[in-house]
């Protein structure tokens, strides 16, 4: 892939970085990243990855834009209310950078489609808003050997970690199983400060670019937590859980499953 | 005397303190769902009451954060 004059100008601030350079920018252009959830986390991640020139960006979300989204989901605008989020996001990403191919997956990600969905990408960003989806993405990515960035936000707090096969613990090592429904408040119940998605979602985009280019050290084996009220970041070392049900040496989870379906089937969580 | 480093803060506690008791003392939110590591090893939830902290132990609490949308 040879860069046009316009592309050299567009990506000049990347190319001048010794950690990126022409080679790194080519890698970014050949990169394929899936963002699950075009919301508070997915919005800034999608914007920055599009601006960076990631070759193929998939956005998966079944929802439409609502007025209450606009306080934090900065990829969507007031005229987009009612529009599918993937369409709204795709329009903004292509407007920022026509080099980028956007795959709009207007689907609810579940056990039936997750493996096929992630198979077309090098790296996955979890921008979902519920524990069932976070565990589903974890299980699918571990089973498929797919690197991904997990993140969660609530109130004035956020956290993220990166999973790379063979290089450290997964999300299930940390939290084992989802909490029962309504045991832990959601953002719609407890609130979330708008810029929190911007901080943490941008860090997820940073991890994706670092993974694609090989620059620096990823958040493998580390949970980075951010407390906006204390204005404090902390890196918490994460051990592997020796008996982890999905990434341990004797996994009991061999296929992705939906927790909601398990509840319906009467299986205790 | 136990000293636990909680998220970068050094604190002193009475001898014989268990992780369960520390969770209570520190008023951990949703204590039944907090993930705890001691010296970079996760403690299983059923072992929290029987895990006694020692001098210079490093304890980390990680909380569920389900938001993203």
Image: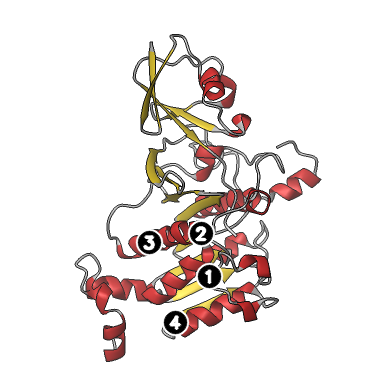
Chain containing the residue with disc 4: A
Contact between marks 2 and 3 (CB within 8 A): the answer is no
Q: Is residue A240 above or below residue A26?
A: above
Q: Which is nearer the N-term, disc 2 or disc 1?
A: 1
Provide residue A89's location: percent of width, then percent of height: 56, 75
For this view, does A118 lie left or right of residue B7?
A: right
Q: Which is nearer the N-term, disc 4 or disc 1?
A: 1
Residue that badge 2 annotates = A197
Residues at marks 2 and 1, CA–CA distance in whole angstroms: 9 Å
Q: Which is nearer the N-term, disc 3 or disc 4?
A: 4
Provide residue A228's location: percent of width, then percent of height: 45, 49
Contact between marks 3 and 4 (CB within 8 A): the answer is no
Q: Nearer the viewer, mark 4 or mark 1?
A: 1
Crowd class of label 1 (few under 14; some 14 to 19; many from 20; radius 10 Å): many
Residue that badge 1 annotates = A74
Dot 2 lies on which element? helix
Residues at marks 2 and 4, CA–CA distance in whole angstroms: 20 Å
Circle on res. A206: 3
Residues at marks 1 and 3, CA–CA distance in whole angstroms: 17 Å
Circle on res. A96: 4
Q: Both on one chain, marks 3 and 4?
A: yes
Q: Which is nearer the N-term, disc 2 or disc 4?
A: 4
């Amino acid at each position: 892939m040879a860069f046009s004059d316009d592309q050299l100008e567009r990506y000049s601030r990347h190319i001048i970085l010794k950690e990126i350079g022409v080679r790194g920018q080519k890698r970014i252009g050949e990169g394929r990243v899936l963002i699950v959830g075009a919301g508070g986390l997915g919005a800034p991640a999608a914007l920055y990855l599009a601006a960076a020139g990631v070759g193929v960006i998939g956005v998966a979300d079944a929802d439409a834009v609502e007025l209450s989204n606009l306080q934090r989901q900065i990829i969507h605008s007031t005229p987009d209310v009612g529009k599918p989020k993937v369409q709204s996001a795709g329009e903004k990403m292509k407007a920022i950078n026509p080099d980028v191919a956007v795959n709009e997956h207007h689907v609810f990600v579940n056990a039936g489609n997750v493996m096929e969905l992630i198979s077309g990408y090098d790296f996955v960003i979890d921008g979902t808003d519920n524990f069932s989806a976070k565990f589903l993405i974890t299980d699918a990515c571990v089973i498929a050997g797919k690197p991904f960035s997990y993140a969660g936000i609530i109130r004035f707090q956020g956290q993220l970690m990166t999973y790379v096969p063979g290089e450290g613990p997964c999300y299930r090592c940390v939290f084992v199983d989802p909490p029962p429904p309504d045991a832990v408040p959601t953002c719609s119940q407890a609130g979330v400060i708008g810029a929190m998605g911007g901080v943490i979602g941008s860090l997820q985009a940073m991890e994706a670019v670092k993974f694609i280019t090989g620059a620096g050290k990823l958040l493998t084996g580390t949970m980075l937590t951010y407390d906006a009220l204390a204005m404090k970041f902390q890196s918490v070392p994460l051990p592997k859980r020796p008996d982890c049900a999905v990434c341990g040496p004797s996994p009991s989870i061999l296929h992705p499953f939906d927790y909601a379906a398990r509840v319906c089937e009467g299986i205790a969580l | 005397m136990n000293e636990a480093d909680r998220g970068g803060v050094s604190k002193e506690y009475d001898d014989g303190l268990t992780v369960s008791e520390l969770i209570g003392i520190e008023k951990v939110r949703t204590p039944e769902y907090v993930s705890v590591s001691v010296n970079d090893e996760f403690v299983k939830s059923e072992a929290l009451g029987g895990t006694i902290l020692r001098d210079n132990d490093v304890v980390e609490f990680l909380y569920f954060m389900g938001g993203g949308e």
